Image (cartoon, helix red, strand yellow):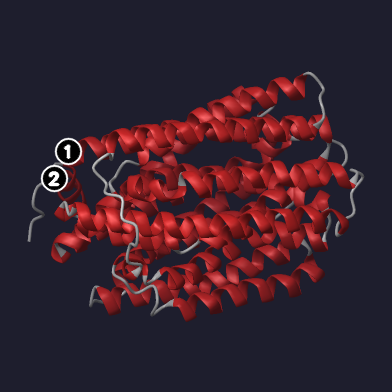
Amino acid sequence: MQLKAKIKYNLVFNVLSQMIILFLGILLPRLVLVSYGSEVNGLLNTISQIFVYIGLLEAGIGNASVNALYKPIVDRDIHTISEIYCATKKYYCKVTIIYFICVVLFAAIYPFCITTSLNHISVILLILFEGMGGVISFWLVAALKQVLIADGRNYIIANITMLVRVSTSIAKIIIISLGYDVLLVQASWFVINCIQVFSYVYYFKRKYAWIEKIENPSIEYLAQKNAFLVHEISGVIFSSTDTFVISTFCGLIAASIYSIYNLVFNSLNSLISAVNNGMHFILGQTYAKDLEKYVKVHDAYDSIYMAVVFSLMSVAYVLIYPFVSLYTSGIEDANYIVEGLPFLFALIQMLSCSRAVASRLINVAGYARATQNRSILEAALNLGVSLILVNIIGIYGALIGTIVALLYRTNDIIIYANTKILKRSPWITYKKMLANFFIFGLIIILEQYLCTWFLDKCSSYLYLAVIAVPVTLVVCIIYFGIAFLQNKDLVSALKIFLQNKSMPK
């Protein structure tokens, strides 16, 4: 398939998929809150996050496999592609057994470690329904997904994910509306998740029938999997520690409050990541072919990526309180309007995005092992500061712990990627960051004057949507204007890049 077609399909289907998933992801928690209460909502979010930790069993192998596949895909080396795929599949089969054991142990132990009005049997079944879907996924489709990603076919994953989420959401809405137990809601997800496996297997056998079956594949291609594992652990601690820490030290209701704010910012992050993931294969394949061309692609992509993230997070910051007010109306077991949380959530996403492209470069360039100790320090900072502060200032403490770790690691990644790999000053990246944060600071000042007006005026989702349109347009124009002013070659670089021609020297 032509590169332009892959880019188009990835962008269109990833965005469409995430828009639908975003809508459903906002609708369903509201139904759960209204039907089952904040405690059950907090419990379900905590269980999901703990399975993110258990999922670290496969962390590292996915990134190692994708990075190893870039060059043979560019060279059309069928034997090497086959060997990497078979080695990856063999590793995932081993992981599946360990993952299954962890699911069973989690289901047997966790229900007796929390305080909840639900009986232990119900909690055990909720955990098993959530976990067994992961067991089946690791066993049958995890390895083939890595080939799809490296080959630029993220749109296949996006389409299947969209169909599964839509089907699951429809089933859950029907079950909740009919007043059935939350166990049946969770069971519906498990059944549909099992069905999706056949879609992946069918497509893979049809499109990649040329992949050879190798009985004893070399694991040399996956040599950096342990280094990637360290980086993945750090990433999960950054993105998922807060829910677990808050639910443990502040209670399930506090975890539910956190989850509502996280729902908004994480949904937007998922939308951005869908586009970003659809473009990763280009960065990887370009680096494997031509470093000089990669540098121009890197700078253009970094500018656009920052502009998109800062724009969406700024809009979310401005409109989050009216949304939360509407979203939690009628729910009286907790106060969901908490001052200061939007700023902390926005800051986390902005700091994270500022390092995203540089972080990807470190992985693609093969420096995962060289930087793994830095990731360990980031994880230690995050967890250590969060555990100390959560007992003092509650939810704020967990978020500040993440920010402290990000302040260290974001700067470290930017400096390392620019000086060590690109052999240049990191000031190129810092100029973009400072300009974007300056605009965000102005938005914070302006929002202080408009907050009360937004809360009073946004009495319905329709009115909120009407206000969101001009706010988004103005904010996007400002951030993208800054991006184009700072990188005068941005338009020509992107145009030539998307036309799949040689980059100008």
Pinpoint residue 320: horizontal percent, then vertical percent. 63, 42
Mark 2: give few (<14), some (14-19) or many (20+) Cα within 10 Å: few
| 30 with respect to 65 (left or right) | right
Pinpoint residue 127: horizontal percent, then vertical percent. 74, 47
Amino acid type assigned to the residue bearing label 1 in the image? Gln
Q: Are marks 1 and 2 in contact (CB under 8 Å)?
A: yes
Marks 1 and 2, how far apart at CA: 9 Å
Per the rendering, the mark at residue 500 is 2
| Residue at image mark 1 | 2
Residue at the (48%, 44%) spot, across then down:
140
Quadrant containing the N terminus in the rendered view: top left
Q: Earlier in the sequence, mark 1 or mark 2?
A: 1
Given this view, does label 1 or label 2 mark the residue nearer the observer? 1
Q: Is residue 363 visible?
A: yes
Pinpoint residue 155: horizontal percent, then vertical percent. 36, 37
Pinpoint residue 49: horizontal percent, then vertical percent. 66, 53
Label 2, secondary structure: give it: loop
Residue at the (44%, 68%) spot, across then down:
228
**Which residue appears farthest toward the front when viewing the image?**
215
Quadrant containing the C terminus in the rendered view: bottom left
Per the rendering, the mark at residue 391 is none
Mark 1: give few (<14), some (14-19) or many (20+) Cα within 10 Å: few
Q: Is residue 374 above or below residue 53?
A: below
